[in-house]
Amino acid sequence: MTDDRSTDRYAEWAGHILFTTLMIVGVANTVADEGTHIGVLVCAGVLAAWYALGAVFSALGRRELVVPWVLVLTAGWIALSVVSADFVWIAFVVAILCWHFLPRGVAAAVVVLVAATAVTATRVSTGGFSVGGVIGPLIGIATAVAVTEAFGRIAAMVDERDRLVDELITTRAQLAARERDAGVLAERERLGGEIHDGTGQSLASIIMLLRAATSPTAPPEQRTAHTETALETAQTALAESRRFLRGLDGPESHPEGLSHALAEQVAAASEDGPRVVFAEHGSPALLSERVQVALQRTVQEALLNVRRHAHADAAAVTLTYLPDEVHVDIVDDGVGIDGVSPPPTGDDAPGSGFGLRAMRARIRTCGGELTVESAPGDGTTIHASVPIERHR
């Protein structure tokens, strides 16, 4: 009776109506009997007042007061039934309250006492035992207990269902928040990789070209060539940045295929840096734009690292087509990377700066793997392998 659910409120008001009806019937029968019944009416009034007090406790949510209220109400009803059998049928309401609020062991004992009192009061009022006088109260009280038990179990199932639904809603909200956070982080990483591989590398190339162009020992024609190359690189970076900001997508693949793209990158890297050669093996396969871009960016980043950090004299880029995979190897004879043995594959591996992380992330999104083999003074080998997507 302390639950705020509408179904419980309906049951509570049904109990109030049933008690009031039975009390009115008992009072009416008492008044209709001959003789003075002031004591019975007073007892009935006290019992009704005590019931009303318990209804107030229930409405206020004072659960700790309900159990003693039920016990006192039961005792009061037993006393009233001993005085007058006209109130014996209130046993139904008392049995419902006992089974609903009292612990099961106590409730069972009290309900048995209530049934015995009802049968006894019926015998006194009829002047002897009869089948109806015994079976009637017992069936009525048993039915009241059964209905109360069923209603309680249904209410418990509804509460459990509501709890599970609340947990599901909370879990879905948490999962959605985590997915949003993961999406934000992934997009931030992707944008960082695009900026690093695109504008960042172009700016690094421009800086090296301008340094070479402003070197006092550089011949005039070489200065002019470096300056023009730096200008072309800046224009390309600007165009790519504008396109990237308009669409927030990655770079486009080379229109003539991966081989031409890598050959152009190797030629550009050889103009002002270590000698780089390009080789291709196997029968060229049709690659998706995502795979081509990932491999282009991988070679671009690797060659930039060779120029900036490796202090290498020579490097080689090899493109190999296998029946189900395409492989790219970038090998240099530079100073190597300290602590990269055995070849790492995780983001936390030694030497895994942002460039290497971006390369690994790109290759991983294509379902491939990227490994780095290096030792101090023994050069560096970067190997990328990506499955070839067959379109049927």
Image (cartoon, helix red, strand yellow):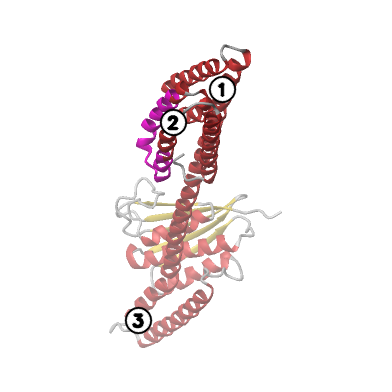
* Residue marked by disc 2: 38
Magenta segment boundaries in residue numbering: 53-79
Marks 1 and 3, how far apart in space? 99 Å
Q: Quadrant of the C terminus?
A: bottom right
Name which of mark 2 and mark 1 comes first in the sequence.
2
Residue 195 falls left or right of residue 279? left
Q: Which residue is drawn at 34% across and 50% down?
A: 340
Query: Circles 1 and 3: CB distance less than 8 Å?
Result: no
* Residue marked by disc 3: 210
When the figure is inspected, residue 310 is found, relative to residue 49, above or below; the finding is below
The residue under label 2 is which amino acid type?
Ile
Residue at the top extreme of this rendering: 129
The residue under label 3 is which amino acid type?
Leu
Residue 9 falls left or right of residue 46? right
When the figure is inspected, residue 1 is found, relative to residue 348, above or below; the finding is above
The residue under label 1 is which amino acid type?
Ala
Q: Does the magenta stretch include residue 253?
A: no
Circle 2 — which element? Answer: helix
Residue at the front extreme of this rendering: 35
Q: Can residue 330 be seen in this view?
A: no
* Residue marked by disc 1: 142
